[in-house]
Structure formats: C-alpha cells, structure tokens
Amino acid sequence: MTLIATLSDLIKGCPRNIKRRLLRDILLILLVTSGAILTIVLFQGIKTQRDISTAIITKANKQVTIHFHSFTEPLGNTLKLLGKWGESNLLKIDDPTLIATQFHALIEIQPNIYSISLADTENNAIRLSHNSGQWILYQYSESGTSSSQWNNGKLQNRKNVDRSSYNMSKAPWFRGAIITAPNSPLFLTGPYVQPDTKELVITTSLHWSKRDNPGRSFVSAVSFTIRSLVTFIEQLEVTANSHILLFEKDGTLLNDDLSTSKSPQSQLSKQLLDNISNRLKSGKLTNNQTISFKNEGKIWWLGIGTLYDSNNEVWVAVIIPEDDIFADLHQQWLRFGLVAGSILLTGIIMTIFLVRKYSH
C-alpha cells in the first residue's frame, strides 16, 4: 500500500481494512486537536492585538495631555503672576506705557505667549500682541478702539481702529473668567479668531480684584495661537507614521492649512481626515475612546479625547496605521504559522509510518 493510495482512500471515505481505519482515526484526532489549539491561539491573538493597540493609543493620549500641560503650565504661572501684580495695584489699566513695558517683558520670557490682555468690568481693556516682529498695543473703551506700535519702550503711531463701542462682556475669555469660582482652575477658552489680528487663538484667563478696592473686578488673560500649539504637540512621536490631530468639537481640523513638517493634508488622504471629522461631528465618538477602522484598504487605529478637562471645545486624535503597531507581531505570527505547519506535517508523516509499521 502506497502513501498516495492510503490518503486517497481516506479522502474518499472508504477505508478497506483496519490499517486505513486506524490511520483515519489517528489523523482525525491529530487534525481536530491541532485545529482546536490553533483556534484558541488565533482568538487569543486577536484579543492581544486589540489590547496592545488600546494600550498604545491610551498611553499616547496621556502623553499628549501631559505635553499640553507642559505647554500651558508656564502660561498659567505668568497669568497667576499678573493676578498678584494686579492685587498689589502694580497693573494700571490707565497707564498704557507701563502696561506695555510689563507685558513685553513677560512675552519675551515666554515666547509661546501671543498676547496678554487686561480688562475691567467697566468695559475698559488693553492688550499687547506681537506678530512677525511687530508689537501692537490695543486699547478699548466706551469711546472706541485704538492701536499703537510698541517700539524701543515707546508707544508710537497711535490711530483709531474702530470708533464704535467695544463690549467686553462678549469676549469669551472675559465672560468665562468672571463666572469661574476663585478656587477653580484657570479658565480656558475654545479656539476663536482674535478680532484685530485675525489669528486663531486660545486664551486662558483669571479673575481678580485689587486689595484696596475689592468692589472693582479685573480679568487678566494670556493667549497662544493654534499654530504654536500644533507645532508644540507635533513634537511628540508615538510611532514612525503616527499623527496627532486637533479638531474642534464640530469636526473642523485645526491642523489644516498650517505649514508644519507633519502637515496632515500632505501625508494623510482627505478621505481619511473626513472619516474622522464626520465621526466626531456625528457624536459617535466619546471621550477617551479607541477604535479601529478601514480606509482605502488600510487599517488605522484611532484614539480620541478632549484636550483639556474644562470644556470639550478641542479634541485630540491620535491616529496610527496598524502596520506600525503590528509589524513585528505579524512577522512573529508568520514564523509561528510556518513552525506550526511544519510540526503538523511532521506529525502526519510520523503517524502514517507508525501505522504502516505496526499494522499487524
């Protein structure tokens, strides 16, 4: 009896003698046992893959949060310093030259600060902003708005920008700080366009009063641009091809149109970005959620959550291609499959020879 004839009889299901029935039974036991073990291994492998992906994404989101805190903490300390100066009557909103000198010094120490503002509840405000090497001081009052260039410690070229009244109560950073309890964390706005410079910014603000005049309230504020925040966040590298994206809660991509080295529109397809944006816009994504999805034949892992706890205006998305996570694991699975197949084939051959030898 040849090996081919024996296997042929097995396939046809027509064992002719005890030898073939024995071979059939042993092979059946071998295949069922191997199949059960392989099924368990594959099931556990899929679960392990999800656990690994979730762990990597969760860790990445925590890294982004910690990184963001390291960005805002110095700005918050500057804001608290301004509050202490104000309480001690060292900030004088009616002295623009003194205010510009103080604000300019603080911004030079903290380059991530785009502008510093001071306002009171009587609709007076003052703000120093810098852009492209120019320093501009804006003054607001009931009579209108004016701007002056700050150059070498002097205010120059003052001009009226808008003669209409400026309603400070509509400013998001002012309104938010006023209603924030004194013992609460600093107020942080969502992204908004600063009216004078048209720059997209986020502002953190603090409400305080002078010790000698507690009835009059003030708000000091520090602003930073979305551009500087994106540049800072993108310093993190989770994997070789990972991306960290910032979205508004309505699904608008904040990284868009920014000329950074990891500009998403140059490295990620529009369909992929729209996929994430539409999921966020539809409300299908929740805070600290990890999901996988397929886009253009490629599997991606996405971790999404709010950037800061005070509100849900800004969401951070960590997106990683599956190949980055499982490149080594897939190679290990391939090696495992080859070894398992070799063992199974060896077992079949040994079973056949065993049956042939002891068939009597």
Image (cartoon, rainbow, N blue to C red):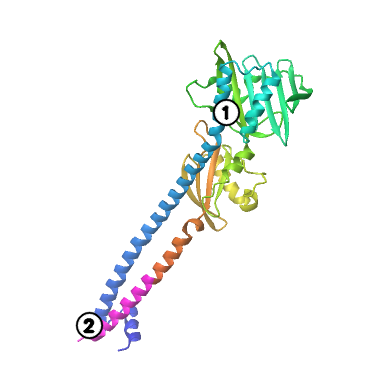
Whole-percent x and y of residue 267? Answer: 62, 53
Task: From the image, give the main secondary structure of the stretch colored magenta.
Answer: helix
Tell me which numbered mark, 1 or 2, is placed earlier along the sequence. Answer: 2
Whole-percent x and y of residue 259? Answer: 67, 46
In percent of the image, x 48 and y 24: which residue is there?
Answer: 184
- What mark, if any, has residue 78 been given in the picture? 1
Residue 36 sits in quarter: bottom left
117 above or below 277?
above
Most extreme residue toward the bottom is 1
Identify residue for label 2: 18
Amino acid on which the number 2 mark rests in the picture: Ile
Residue 232 sits in quarter: top right
Amino acid on which the number 1 mark rests in the picture: Thr
Left or right, residue 133 beside residue 256: right
Check disc 1: other Cα within 10 Å, few if <14, some if 14-19, many if 20+.
many
Whole-percent x and y of residue 62? Answer: 47, 42
- What mark, if any, has residue 200 been given in the picture? none
Towards the viewer: 88 or 323: 88
Say which element carries label 1.
helix
257 above or below 36?
above
49 above or below 354?
above
Residue 343 is one of the magenta-drawn residues: yes
- Residue span colored magenta: 339-360
Q: Nearer the viewer, mark 1 or mark 2?
A: 1
Give how far apart the Cα atoms at labels 1 and 2 are: 90 Å
